[in-house]
Image (cartoon, rainbow, N blue to C red):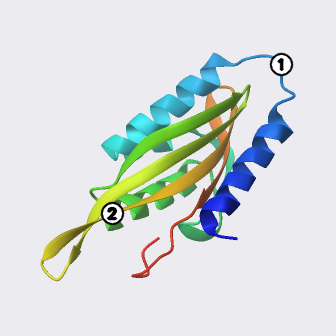
């Protein structure tokens, strides 16, 4: 099974699991819309401010768990440092009250032997939003690292 199929299965399973929620929370969707706007601006200060102090962040970018605004700061500073041209395009959003699943494309350029080479890959993030803050995030990717990059 390839990585794209695995991400599709994870995405579908999460949709089925969380589809029981009945009340729509527009605040959660606004938090995620702002999150991707800040990601495209590479605005680490704004991103850091979106996370609850107790937020648990799991990302393929760095091993282990990160916590709260400082953990988000560490992850996003690293991401934007190694990929300063990276942009994020949302493909699909599943909004289930306080759980939001976002499937998105990541695109950018990297220098290879004095010229720029484009790249793109697909990520899927599951966000838990509580009281207008990101209380949890798990990000999965179909990216196959070739240069030790995230």
Between disc 1 and disc 2, the foreground one is: 1
Sequence-earlier tag: 1 or 2: 1
Q: Which mark is residue 73?
A: none
Looking at the rendered structure, the secondary structure element under dot 2 is: loop
Q: Is residue 24 above or below residue 139?
A: above
**Is any atom of residue 45 visible in this view?**
no
Q: Residue at x 73, y 17 (%)?
A: 24
Q: Position of residue 85 (x, y in %)?
A: 27, 56
Q: Could you tell whether 86 is left or right of 35 in the image?
A: left
Quadrant position of the N terminus in the picture: bottom right
Q: Nearer the viewer, residue 136 or 141?
A: 141
Badge 2 local density, few (<14 within 10 Å), some, or many (20+)?
Answer: some
Q: Position of residue 120 (x, y in %)?
A: 39, 60
Q: Which mark is residue 22?
A: 1
Q: Could you tell whether 128 is left or right of 18 in the image?
A: left
Q: Residue at x 75, y 45 (%)?
A: 12
Q: Nearer the viewer, residue 62 or 139?
A: 139
Q: Position of residue 99 (x, y in %)?
A: 72, 35
- The extreme left residue here reads 114
Q: Position of residue 59 (x, y in %)?
A: 60, 61
* Residue linked to disc 2: 83
**Is any atom of residue 99 visible in this view?**
yes
Q: Residue at x 33, y 55 (%)?
A: 86
Q: Residue at x 26, y 63 (%)?
A: 109
Badge 1 local density, few (<14 within 10 Å), some, or many (20+)?
Answer: few
Residue 136 is drawn in which quadrant?
Answer: top right
């Amino acid at each position: 099974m390839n990585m794209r199929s695995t991400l599709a299965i994870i995405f579908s399973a999460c949709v089925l699991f969380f589809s029981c929620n009945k009340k729509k929370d527009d605040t959660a969707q606004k938090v995620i819309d702002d999150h991707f706007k800040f990601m495209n601006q590479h605005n680490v200060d704004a991103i850091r401010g979106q996370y609850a102090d107790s937020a648990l962040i799991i990302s393929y970018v760095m091993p282990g768990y990160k916590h709260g605004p400082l953990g988000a700061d560490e992850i996003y500073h690293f991401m934007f440092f190694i990929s300063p041209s990276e942009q994020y395009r949302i493909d699909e959003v599943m909004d289930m009250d306080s759980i939001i699943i976002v499937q998105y494309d990541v695109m950018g350029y990297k220098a290879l032997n004095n010229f720029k080479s484009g790249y793109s890959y697909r990520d899927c993030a599951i966000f838990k939003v509580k009281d207008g803050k990101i209380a949890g995030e798990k990000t999965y990717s179909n990216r196959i690292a070739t240069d030790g990059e995230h």
